[in-house]
Amino acid sequence: MNGWYILPNGNIKHLDGLEVQPERDWLPTDESLEAYAGRQREAGKTELQIVRMVMQLAMDGEAWVKENLS
């Protein structure tokens, strides 16, 4: 779960560019989701794989916050 950092606006961002919003049930920001999905499509990932990866990253981000900010 390395690679996460907190932004000044309170969102949590991963080094891969996906930014999740704790106050919005850990959903990614629209901009970061579009950029992340675009890069994954270019790498040959299917939509299902992208959704699974986004969901896993959001859960990892939440766990990272609990472990490091409690």
Image (cartoon, helix red, strand yellow):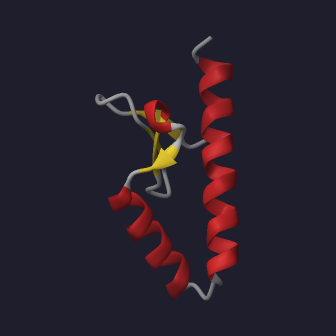
Q: Is residue 40 above or below residue 31?
A: below
Q: In this view, does 22 lie above or below 30?
A: above
Left or right for 58, reference 33: right
Left or right for 19, reference 43: left
Q: Is residue 59 visible?
A: yes
Q: Quadrant of the C terminus?
A: top right
For the point 35% across and 33% down, the residue is 7
Q: Where is residue 57 in the image (x, y as percent from the top left)?
A: 63, 51
Q: Residue furthest front?
A: 24
Q: Quadrant of the N terminus?
A: top right
Q: Is residue 1 visible?
A: no
In the depicted view, which residue is nearer to us: 52 or 14? 52
Q: Residue 31: which quarter of the image?
A: bottom left
For the point 46% across and 67% down, the residue is 36
Q: Residue furthest top?
A: 70
Q: Is residue 38 above or below residue 64?
A: below
In the depicted view, which residue is nearer to us: 22 or 36? 22
Total marks shown come to 0
Q: Residue 66: which quarter of the image?
A: top right
In the depicted view, which residue is nearer to us: 15 or 13? 13
Q: Position of residue 16 (x, y in %)?
A: 50, 58
Q: Residue furthest left?
A: 8
In the depicted view, which residue is nearer to us: 69 or 20? 20
Q: Position of residue 26 (x, y in %)?
A: 54, 40
Q: Where is residue 40 in the image (x, y as percent from the top left)?
A: 54, 77
For the point 57% across and 84% down, the residue is 43
For the point 62% across and 33% down, the residue is 62
Left or right for 47, reference 27: right
